[in-house]
Amino acid sequence: MQAVFSEAAERNKHPILEKLHPLLVTCKKVLEIGSGTGQHAVYFAAALPHLQWQPTELPETLPLLSSQCGRYPLDNLATPIALDIDTAKWPVTRADAVFTANTLHIIHWPQVCRLFTQVGKLLPEYGICCTYGPFNIDGRYTSESNAQFDSWLKKRDPESGIRDIANLQQHAKICGLSLQENYAMPANNRLLVWSKCALIE
């Protein structure tokens, strides 16, 4: 199968790793939702040999991801598995951390909610979920390019679009997740770090 390359993933993988590295120091297993071309999975697994990186993709695109990851035989890069956000029972039920890049503005809002719900269930106390991509702040775009990108997204699929951080926080709270960090990233993107709230006895 021919290799597929994402220029965006290649550009942003190092800035993302700089933020992820200290966040994942004590983690043993990371679940990546929507691994795409696998460039993040391969790069992060190689840079973080102390943890197991679990790539996932939709069933129909899993063969491509598997082919891509198969080119890099890393001991801590798990075999990619199928994961559909809409499936009630996910194939992974526990992970120390979750990572997903450029997914929340592609999937529909009910799917965003289901993602947070499932993440809230599978993370341990103080586990983290890192979401990367473009986000709005207080109902406003952070750049003109993001506004244009959002318009393009909605023309392609009216149910997609850049999500507002306040709306995400509202649903995340229901799922036991709170926003701990909001990092500004290159190209008008952000890395939002959500933490599983402490359990109340």
Image: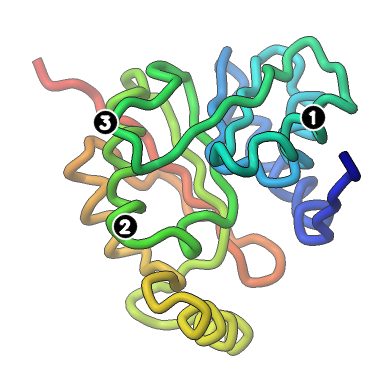
Mark number, residue 168: 2
Q: Is residue 115 left or right of residue 193?
A: left
Give me the residue at 28% from left, 56% from top.
110
Percent position (x, y) of residue 101? 59, 50
> Tag 1: residue type?
Cys
Q: Earlier in the sequence, mark 2 or mark 3?
A: 2
Task: Please tell me in which quadrant of the rendered image residue 163 appears.
Answer: bottom left
Q: Position of residue 183 (x, y in %)?
A: 56, 55
Q: Mark 2: which amino acid?
A: Leu
Placement of 184 over or under 2, stated as above or below? below
Which residue has dot 3 on it?
A: 197
- 26 and 87: which one is in front? 87
Q: Secondary structure at mark 1?
A: helix
Q: Nearer the viewer, mark 2 or mark 3?
A: 2
In this image, 195 relative to 71: left or right? left
The residue under label 1 is: 69
Task: Tell me if residue 143 comes above or below residue 110 in the rendering.
Answer: below
Left or right position of 6 against 201: right
The N terminus, quarter of image: top right
